[in-house]
Structure formats: C-alpha cells, structure tokens
C-alpha cells in the first residue's frame, strides 16, 4: 500500500467502527451513550472526508484516461490510482454500513426507562425496542381506515411521548418519523387524489405524527419524516394486507453540532416483559374498500 492509501484509510476509522459496533447493543449508561454519540458524529465527518477524497481520485482518473497516446507509465499511474480509488470506496462503504447499523441505538438508560414505561402503559398502540431505540405505532389504532389524521387516543399518547422527547436525556437526539403501509393499493378516488399511492399515504401519516409531536412541543428543527409505502414489510402480506405492516416508526439518532447535556443516570430498568406484543384489533385487516 502506498503513502496515499495510508493517508486516506485513516487509523481512526477502525476504532470508530469498533466503537459504534460495541456501543450499539441496547440499553446503556448516559456516559456510554455520550461516547457512542461522539463516535457517531466523528464518523459523519470522516464519511464526508472519504467522499471528498474519492471525488478527487475520480477526477484524477478521468484526467489520465483522457490523455492521448497512453503508454506503459501512464497505464501504471492509472492502475495505481484505480487501486487507491477502490480502497477509498471500500473504506467509505464500511463507514456507511456502520452508520446505518448504529442509527437508533443505543439510548441513555433514563431515556430507555421512560420509553419502556410509556409503551407498557399503551400496549395496544405502541411498542418500544430497547435494543434499537425504535418506537413503533400501529397505524390501525393511530389512524382511521384509509385516513391520515391522528385519532384522539393516539394524540394523547403522542403528547406523552413529546414530553419524553423534550426531556434532558433526549433533547440532543433527532426524531425521525417513518411511515409504512401494507401492499393493498390505494383505490379510493378521494385518497388517490390526496395521496396518489401507498408511498404518499405513508408519508402523510408520518407528517401527521410529526405535526402532533410538534404541537406538543417537540421543535420542528429536531424532526424529519420519510415514507416507505409497502417497500419494507415486517411480515408477509395477505390478499387484504397485513396489520403489522401498517405502522409508523420513530427513531432517535444523534443530532450533529450539539453538546451532550449531563444527565443523571437512573438505575438500569428490568427490561424483562417490558415490551408487550400488540394484540391484533378486530378486524385484524383493513377492508380494501376503505383504501
């Protein structure tokens, strides 16, 4: 490996990736969560640097390949630059994979405890996974069939969630709201006009949840939304769709440019049985006529 490759494959990268892997294993202390957050943000900076270096190598390669009358020396330069470019790409892919695996985990113990308490008090509406930091709301209770406005029962729980998200333990985390649907196409004429398809419906439902959290006090600058439609099912879809796939998920990920507030750790909660599986509502699947 030549000097250029040693430079861009930073010695800090393996340590950052290892740190993200070791810390991304569920409920941790505030100190450990802060360490993970700092590594996460440092890895973001490293990814930007790797991308910039990769762009430079691509430009150099394009320039060399554009030269007339290539000779053996020029081909050797091209081969060397190609090897450097490939090593850069491998480092970037590894860093991006670590970032994707780290998103949503871990959270401070006190925050995990509060989210588990809220989920346990509302088992028919939401669940919380302490291993990934993911909050999941069931669409069939959060919304009426074929609608995107949040129902009253869910508004109350989202208000309680907003209080948790505004606590000192959570204030330095971004709130990412993601909507999902089953595979039943949107056919109702009014819904087709409003949402066009499942992607649109999932995005509008994510927006509705985000607006409820904003109304309850979560700053708009901390939140983002996404809609995946039917593209990421968590269970096989039957002909009438599957209730489990109709959901809104909320992820808490570190916000860049924020310092971590010192938060007193609560005792580690007993997580056994804290996450209660949702009971299927009746009817379990939505009639296609509503959609």
Image (cartoon, helix red, strand yellow):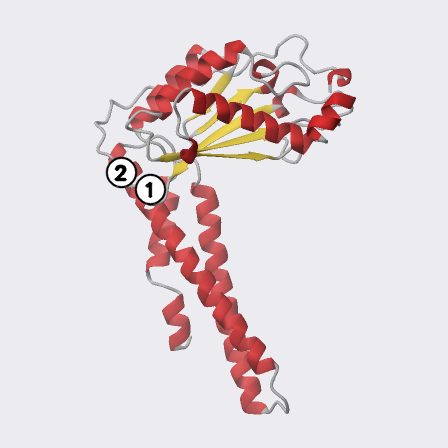
Task: Give the alpha-carbon distance from disc 2 to disc 1, as whole Å.
Answer: 9 Å
Q: Which mark is residue 72?
A: none
- Judge the density around disc 2: few (<14), some (14-19), many (≥20) Cα neighbours within 10 Å: many
Quarter the C terminus occupies: top right
Of the pair 260 and 14, the residue shown nearer to us: 260
Left or right, 105 with respect to 143, comes to left
Specify whether 97 is left or right of 229. left
The answer to whether residue 272 of the structure is visible from this angle is no
The residue positioned 30% from the left and 27% from the top of the image is 109
Query: Tag 2's secondary structure?
Result: loop
The answer to whether residue 191 is visible is yes
Residue 223: quadrant of the picture: top left
Callouts 2 and 1 close, C-beta under 8 Å: yes
Q: Position of residue 213 (x, y in %)?
A: 45, 23
Question: Sequence-wise, which precedes: disc 2 or disc 1?
Answer: 1
Rendered location of residue 20, percent (x, y)? 37, 45
The residue indicated by pointer 1 is: 37
- Name the residue: 63% across, 14% down: 144
Which label is found at residue 260? 2
Question: Relative to 118, does residue 203 appear above or below in the rendering?
Answer: below
Q: What is the quadrant of residue 287 in the picture?
A: top right
- Tag 1: Cα neighbours inside 10 Å, few (<14), some, or many (≥20)? many
Indicate the quadrant containing the N terminus: top left, top right, bottom left or bottom right: bottom left
Which callout, 2 or 1, points to the residue nearer the camera?
Answer: 2
Seen from the viewer's position, the closer of residues 155 and 276 is: 155
């Amino acid at each position: 490996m030549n000097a250029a490759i040693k430079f861009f494959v930073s010695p800090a990268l393996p340590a950052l990736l290892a740190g993200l892997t070791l810390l991304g294993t569920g409920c941790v202390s505030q100190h450990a969560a802060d360490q993970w957050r700092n590594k996460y943000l440092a890895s973001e900076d490293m990814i930007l640097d790797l991308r910039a270096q990769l762009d430079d190598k691509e430009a150099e390669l394009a320039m060399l390949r554009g030269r007339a009358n290539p000779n053996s020396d020029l081909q050797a330069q091209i081969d060397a630059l190609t090897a450097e470019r490939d090593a850069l790409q491998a480092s970037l892919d590894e860093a991006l994979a670590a970032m994707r695996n780290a998103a949503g985990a871990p959270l401070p113990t006190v925050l995990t405890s509060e989210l588990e308490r809220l989920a346990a008090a509302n088992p028919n509406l939401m669940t919380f996974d302490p291993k990934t930091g993911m909050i999941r709301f069931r669409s069939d209770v959060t919304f009426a069939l074929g609608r995107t406005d949040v129902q009253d029962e869910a508004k109350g729980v989202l208000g309680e969630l907003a209080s948790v998200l505004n606590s000192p333990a959570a204030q330095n985390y971004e709130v990412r709201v993601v909507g999902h649907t089953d595979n039943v196409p949107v056919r109702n004429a009014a819904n087709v006009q409003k949402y066009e398809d499942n992607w649109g419906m999932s995005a509008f439902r994510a927006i509705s949840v985000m607006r409820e959290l904003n109304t309850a006090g979560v700053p708009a600058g901390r939140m983002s939304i996404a809609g995946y439609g039917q593209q990421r099912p968590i269970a096989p879809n039957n002909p009438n769709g599957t209730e489990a796939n109709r959901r809104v998920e909320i992820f808490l990920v570190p916000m860049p440019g924020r310092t971590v507030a010192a938060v007193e750790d609560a005792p580690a909660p007993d997580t056994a049985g804290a996450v209660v599986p949702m009971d299927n509502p009746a009817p379990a699947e939505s009639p296609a006529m509503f959609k």
